[in-house]
Amino acid sequence: MQVFKLYFKLLKSAAPALIIYLVVFSILIFVLSSNQRKSATGFEEVKIDMALVNYDGEHLLVQDFLEYLKSYCNFKDYGEDENDLADALFFREVEYILTIPYDFGEDFIAGKDVRLEKKAIPDGVYNSSVDQVINNYLNTARIYLTAIPNISEEDLVSYIRKDINTEAEVSIDANENKGEENGFYNQYFNMASYIMLSCCLLGVGLIMLTFHNVHILRRNLVTPMTHKNMNFQLIGGNLIFVLTYDIFFILLGFLMNENKSLNGNVLLFWLNLIIFSVSALSISYLVAVLVKSRQANEAVSIVLPLGLSFISGAFIPQFLLGDSVLKLASFTPLYWFVKGNDTIAGLVNFNWDNLKYIYFYMLIQLGFAAAVFSLSLVAGKNRRRDNY
Amino acid sequence: MIVEVKNLVKRYDKLLALDHLNLAVKKGEIFGLLGPNGSGKTTAINCILSLLKYDKGSIEIFGKPMRPDAYDIKKNIGIIMQNVAVFEELTVYENISYFCSLYVKDKKEVKQLTEEAIVFVSLQDFTKFLPKKLSGGLLRRLNIACGIAHKPGLIILDEPTIAVDPQSRNKILERIKKLNENGATVIYTSHYMEEVEQLCSRISIIDKGKVIATGTKDELKNMISLGEKITVEAYNLKEEQLDEMMRISNIAQVDYSDNLLEIKSKKGKNNLIHILDYLQSHDINFGKIFTEMPTLNDVFLEITGKELRD
Ligand SMILES: Nc1ncnc2c1ncn2[C@@H]1O[C@H](COP(=O)(O)OP(=O)(O)OP(=O)(O)O)[C@@H](O)[C@H]1O
Ligand SMILES: [Mg+2]
């Protein structure tokens, strides 16, 4: 356990920087959460402004759906131009953009896997409530379509309305806080990823650089401690390190959030964070193998997380970023982490169809971590051979 | 034999760093490995410790073949590397204690051994210092303490006095002698012949990865034809007198400048007397006289045709 103990002694020299990161982040989050408290008002009193892009104007199901949505939203028309729409969102003229694709109604009834496209401002308090209202309608429709094959469109819409008008109010009331709470967590965890990556690069990088130093490495190799044992203890130290951060972020988020309920969304946020921390660890390994000095590692630990966080949407929502930026970002785990969070925030129905996307994003992060770990192993071997 | 190296060959790509190197270190001795910079001392040590793969040859320590996984052998070796290998973030005490704890399981024992090692290298006043706050000499002493705290039977020191002031150097040499007196076998590499002469009971001289001579310092000096060097403060010597002196038996070389007469003699008896006789019989005034025995540098010079240090 000597190396394991040593690990945390060595961390001491990075402790001031690590603590500053956490303190600044905590203050920032505190401000964020007090904003959240101010804007919390009842959902029923407010209708949110929504830009509607309807490519499927005629279909009866769509017509009825929009009619139903009117009691929750004010529709605004900004045309179909993506830039205009993005501007409207950016300047908060609308909080939500809903796009209905061509032949949506027909395809939906035919049982095809069609989806409405949604964009929303990240801290919109009622976004999830709107999501839920929409999901409610479509899920009910799906149920009737499965239960009564060949049902006519007229029957379908009247059944749905009968159903929903009795239930919707209740279910929305019960979930009144949900959107608000997810909005906070969504932004909170997106931003936490930046701190997580910075601190990992700094802390883990410091330790790995120390132990990769050829003189220190040789000095350890001539002792009776096996090389395997040493690596094992180092990996243990690294895992404890990131797990401590995971727990810190989970607890801080829990304390700062108004809503203390532990629902499925919250658990998924947590899982996503833990998975992301593994890929952050892998990046730290690789950087430590590639850079030559502690100064270089510190520089990378400042620049890399900032850059990745910007292009991946940890600070600015992904839908406000350009396609080419996002394409670039999609080669990093941070992008998939943020995408996962955004999806979890909008998740109302925990069925496989919705969950599979989230699990898929997590899987990509794990795959990335595995690839980067192997890469740093290979790079580390080459580097050692150069020195020997 | 404590260490036995046979026909060790090590290449770095094209460079032949060790060329059929043979070494044999006996129990209880201080064995010196003397060679100029780049002669392969560190490479030899790293091969002996299984830190480097080598191309040919065999290495035995304590009578057993040395391998990367020979942990029972490693347990009884103390190593002081040429490059100081300590943790910048740990204090003097913590560094020694860490390395000691890799060899010794019992916590109390580690504590005691650490404290003993600190006293042994006289770092009592610096136990809470970080390495970067230590002077070069103190840092070397810390490096040594980290290597010997667990009281190993074999201690290998690779140029432990490099970049160290003469006072610290003497202290270090004295400590190494003490370790040897306490029962440890010592291997000591250096390119300072004075150190090796002062310290080692047996010496191998190495050049270009090859051992060119082995023996006690007297044995080594007897291998060459050169005898003592005689320097005389003498006045008004003439050219022809220098030529005459060259003809005295056993004189190899005569130089004269700034009233200093330097004579290199070959091995033989009464060399000094012959010279003094000559000076007296020619009424030459002379002042101070000193003689020097040949050094290991002379040995190196005669065998390789170049100076040990350039
Ligand atoms: N990793 C390496 N790659 C290539 N060549 C090397 C390497 N290490 C040492 N050498 C070469 O091998 C030769 C022996 O080097 P080594 O370090 O063993 O010498 P040394 O006797 O310890 O010298 P010094 O007194 O300077 O410490 C030198 O010519 C050196 O340049
Ligand atoms: Mg060397």
Image (cartoon, rainbow, N blue to C red):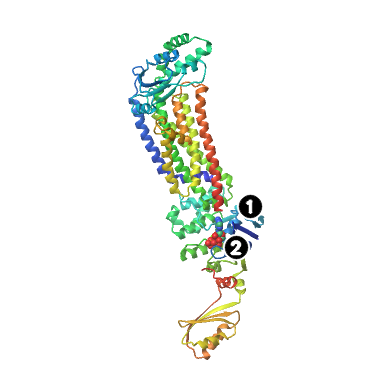
Would residue B25 be visible to someone looking at this image? no
Would residue A318 be visible to someone looking at this image? yes
Tell me which chain the residue with mark 2 is part of: B
Does residue B37 sit above or below A189 in this rendering? below
Which badge, 2 or 1, comes first in the chain's sequence? 1
Name the residue: 59% across, 79% down.
B266
Instruction: Give how far apart the Cα atoms at labels 2 and 1 are.
Output: 21 Å
Q: Dot 2 surroundings within 10 Å: few (below 14), some, or many (20 or more)? A: many
Q: Position of residue A165 (x, y in %)?
A: 42, 11
Q: Position of residue B270 (x, y in %)?
A: 58, 83
Amino acid type of the residue that numbered disc 1 sits on in the rendered structure: Arg
Q: Which residue is mark 1?
A: B67
Q: Which residue is mark 2?
A: B209
Mark 2 CB near ligand 1 (8 Å cut): yes
Q: Nearer the viewer, mark 2 or mark 1?
A: 2
Does residue A76 sit above or below B170 in this rendering? above
Name the residue: 39% across, 14% down.
A67
Query: Which picture quadrant has residue B44?
Result: bottom right
The foreground one among A261 and A103 is A103
